[in-house]
Amino acid sequence: MKVAMTVNGTLESHDVEARTLLVDYLRNVVGLTGTNIGCDTTSCGACTVLLNGQSVKSCTVLAAQAAGDDITTIEGLALEDGRLNPVQQAFQECHGLQCGYCTPGMVMAITSLLTENPHPTEEDVRVGLEGNLCRCAGYHNIVASALAASGVVEMHQ
Amino acid sequence: MIPASFDYVRAESVDEAIGLLSEHGDDAKLLAGGHSLLPLMKLRLAQPAMLIDIGHLRELSYVKEEKGYVCVGALTRHHDLANSLVARASAPVLAHVAGQIGDPQVRHRGTIGGSIAHGDPASDLPAALLALGGSLVVQGPNGIREIDANDFFLSFFEVALTPEEVLIEVRVPRSEGQWGFEKLTKRAMDWAIVGALAVRTSNGVGVALINMGPVPMHARAVEAALASGANASDAAQHAAEGTEPSADFNGSVAYRRHVAKVLVGRALKTAGV
Amino acid sequence: MSILGNRVVRREDPKFLTVGGTYVADLDLPGSVYLTFVRSSMAHAKLLSVDTSGAKAMPGVVAVYTNDDLGIARMPTIMGMTNEAMTQPMLASGTVRYVGEPIVAIVAESREIAADALEAVVVEYEPLTVVIDPAEARKDNDLLFPDAGTNTTFTLDFGGDEALFDDCEVVVELTLINQRVAPCPMEGRSAAAHMTKDGRLEFNSATQAPHGVRDGLAGFLGLEPDKVHVVTPDVGGGFGAKASVYPEDIVVGWCAVHLGRPVRWTETRSESMLGLGHGRAQLQHVRMGGTRGGVISAYRIDVLQDCGAYPAFGAVLPFMTRVMTSGPYKIPKAEFGSVSVVTNSTPTTAYRGAGRPEATAAIERTMDVFAREIEMDPAELRRRNLIGKDEFPYTTPTETVYDVGDYHQALELALEVAGYDELRAKQARRRASGDPIQIGIGLSCYVEITNGLPDGEFGAVEVRPDGKIIVRTGTSPHGQGHVTAWSMLVAEQMGVPIEDIEVIYGDTDVVPRGAGTMGSRSLQIGGAAVNQAAVDVVEKAKDLAADLFEADREDIVLDKSNASFHVIGTPAVSKSWGELAKAAVAKDGNPLFAEVDLASPGPTFPFGTHISVVEVDVETGKVTLLRHIAVDDAGRILNPLLAEGQVHGGIAQGVAQALLEEVVYDPDGNPLTSTFADYSFISAAELPSFETRFTETPTPINALGAKGIGESGTIGSTPALHNAVCDAVAHLGVRHVDMPTTPIRVWNAINDAAPHHDAKNTTKKGGR
């Protein structure tokens, strides 16, 4: 079947099997491999992308369900001149990533979190990231990145 | 990780969905948020031949108050229910429980209808529905009917929907009374090892349990004790009566029975009982 | 102005944050076929028949293989120390011995067809008796390998003094479970392979040791090592479990050779939970004796190590446990014994700490039990027994020589940061109030061994004519930030800005040899090798500059502030690195470079003290971690940002073991925790931000003064959390709670300890 959706501002249209998961569509069909697969039980959040501005686990959405929707992946975040956006910048400054595998999902989840709650407390961030697992960083600097970004985002608003 | 093949159709209306269900019978399943069904399909524990996607039926996504009831469209996402001003004002326990389901990503997709129709005794929303004394509005080939929540959960993952029916609305009486919600988990994201919910309604105090048997259930003995004048502390001691908790590595039967009493007691206390 | 010791942000990050890393599954390999494995659903069974006809007949299935088709030798014994009769075949042969053991390899044109074909294979099993409990396995009533005649594969004995505890006023005894856990790197195992036009096998692997993979493939597939080219792209974590070659990796290579098409394999998480090696899995029996005044004089630990079905690295890890038997204490007599047995479960392997967390967990828990026995504060007991800072190098009773340390400093700093006395006072108040939420404070003083294997490391530095520096390293980072760290070392030596330094790793053609990254070795041996190569290049450059300036060698100055050389006194006349590089080529055709094979100067011993503060709901058993304080000393810290990150990650894993995580099998060997939904992988919601400090006691062992830090967080944190939970309920009569301290375990311990305690404990005032 044909599915069409906007991905990072570009209209994508392809023929896929109905059973194609959105994450596999993005990775294998559209060719955006930044989004990763970390589990098979909707637990880890490595596959998190934005669907109409809200974080979703793209492994638990069919590409067909997302037809007509607006998807943003990690590849679609940097500023127009290629500079890192405030969340990305905060991650580098706060050492929020090590192996990088959970990172795109974390960044997308935090982006959505800050959209809904621009001034989160540390607890808000930790609970807000309960669906994003990381094995390398112990979450400490990821949380710091989110809080740092919220300060910057606030400055820019 | 990759489900078995299936046919996919996007229903443009509830009637169309009903028609497709009638046509395909057991081979077809409804797809709403997909966060109960797709995980099963990815592990190939479920292999429906057809998915009928009703997730885009905007007309089933609403929260409104009508004649003393809070009416929630079955396709209302947990996130939207949790943030609904109407729900927060008039059915706050429902809004709160919706806001605790899974994680933010799950809440952006999962729907109240999908969650309740799944019939999982470890789910939080069915308990809220029971404690509030709610009902389900379903639509089928023969029209619309309302099912009392107490008659909805039949057995393990089995609800009182015929194969051609679509759950279209969840209704709870308006409740501004106090409530308490206690959930024991190992991790924040986990299903409850045991959960308890207490709500003061116009009919008294509704008390429901999570993961204490094959179906979502009232804590009937607690409700009865309260109704006959027992204080919260004494009433809570009845929490395990009539329950059939299972044993797994997260809890023995004795442990779950004990925890049910503790959590019911705490929920009642928070509810000001 | 030295760059060393600074919080330099990672050069690696922008790529990961904008387009994501490139992991094996992301590689663009046109024309690939996809490999997947049918895995055993039985823990122990004879394979009566394996019917692959249905899969073979499916359109799009390229090939289906069983073990007989492959003709590959079995996996080897572990360093020659485990039983030859217990080696694992590439695919199950005749008998399956754990749920998840690969039986059939299916190659298909697409991932989807491969997944569908899995369902078409029909395996008939004849169940055999399942042995899951290592204590049962040890009895040898039911053998996994009849030819072996036993289930025991490796034993160690150190000491055997029957009178070890005779002189002790007080002796405490304890049995502890250091439970099986799953490493769970966020990226599972993944490999891809293809044959090049010139007949070489090109192999991409999510590994911690590319050269080990190269040699493994060469050996198993009968290829010369130079016919195998391993390229490791980004790797999503390893934690020890990706430090060795798996049968699946070899099958990927074999398929590429035989099919002549690119083959790729990426396991699902469910497969990974069964197929990637598990960690820990020790049953420990300990005895500790000493005086009533708190001087420990004797300690013995006996370990029963669960190897899983086929002895892998986990079988011999008790050796590392033995190395660290007596911890940071000056216990005069210590003994160790271990027996490693096979059971019908996933093979165990190295997992962050690899044998040392087990040693620390045992002795630290026992110290608390001893302290309680003699009614001494646990911090005071440790204070009295820690090795003093003037006693180094210190030789332990198990013949380990610790390099240098100041254990007391770490202890006192941790107590200060924690506010220990106030915490104890708060705990006393909480106990007096009868609040159902009780406080627990747990300590852990640890020392551990890093760079414990004898391998040296390769490092090379070359200057390009444009002045850019190419660094090659034999380490294999998978999150540790070696590009940034090695750039800092080279920048320090050469004065070149780090942006002009390229660090290459993971490519066995470009880096000729290397031992990879594990065991917290990389900085002290890999970084040191790169550092030495940079030093050597500076010396060569000075020689060249002396020639060019026609000056005395001693008068040549490297001005690091502008990366150039001049003769002392005439800084205006200088040569840049690029100019010298050109001069080198002009002189004899060779670039300006240095290669170093740095022999290992020996292990180093980082140490520290961790303190956990928990709340325990005594009515439900639920534990909440409120605070975790970590004081760690890894000698000279190169980049505190990176070092902290390692400690954070280590703490999360260590706390997770004490609090939540366990691999569970039912008595039939069925895994009950084989997905991320069932396995309690710790999330951000269960953890606080950590309070970390470093002390720096530089080691004399290597030129950098640096010890490893990668595993310290894990080793130090597990017993701190464990002790905190036990401490929280000690006043209720609980002596010990096994890990993980899940609500049911804690509650059972409370319930069992106090039969007179009112089980219907109602909520008291102040409760939540």
Image (cartoon, rainbow, N blue to C red):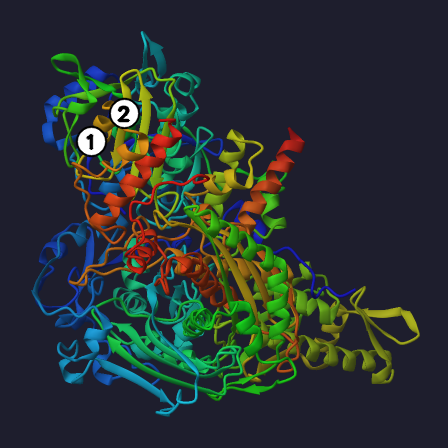
Identify residue for label 1: B221
Place of residue A94 in the rendered image (x, y in percent of width and height, measured from the top left): 61, 50
Q: Secondary structure at mark 2?
A: strand
Q: Quadrant of residue B102?
A: top left
Q: Nearer the viewer, residue C365 or C79?
A: C365
Q: Nearer the viewer, residue A35 or C64?
A: A35
Asked if residue C265 is positioned above or below residue A125 in the image, the reply reads below
Residue labelled with disc 2: B206
Q: What kind of residue is marked 1? A: Ala
Residue C256 shows in the view: yes
- Residue at 38% in and 62% down: C183
Question: In the image, which disc is placed on residue B49?
Answer: none
**Image side of residue A118 versus residue C21, left or right:** right
Residue B101 appears in the figure: no
Q: Amino acid at mark 2?
A: Gly
Q: In front of the other: label 2 or label 1?
A: 1
The 10 Å Cα crowd at callout 2, few under 14, some 14 to 19, many 20 or more, is: many
Judge by depth and name the residue closer to the eye, C534 or C760: C760
Q: Of the residues under marks 2 and 1, which one precedes in the sequence?
A: 2
Residue A120 spot, x, y in % from top left = 55, 35
Q: Is residue C226 above or below residue A29?
A: below
Q: On what subunit does the disc labeled 1 rest? A: B
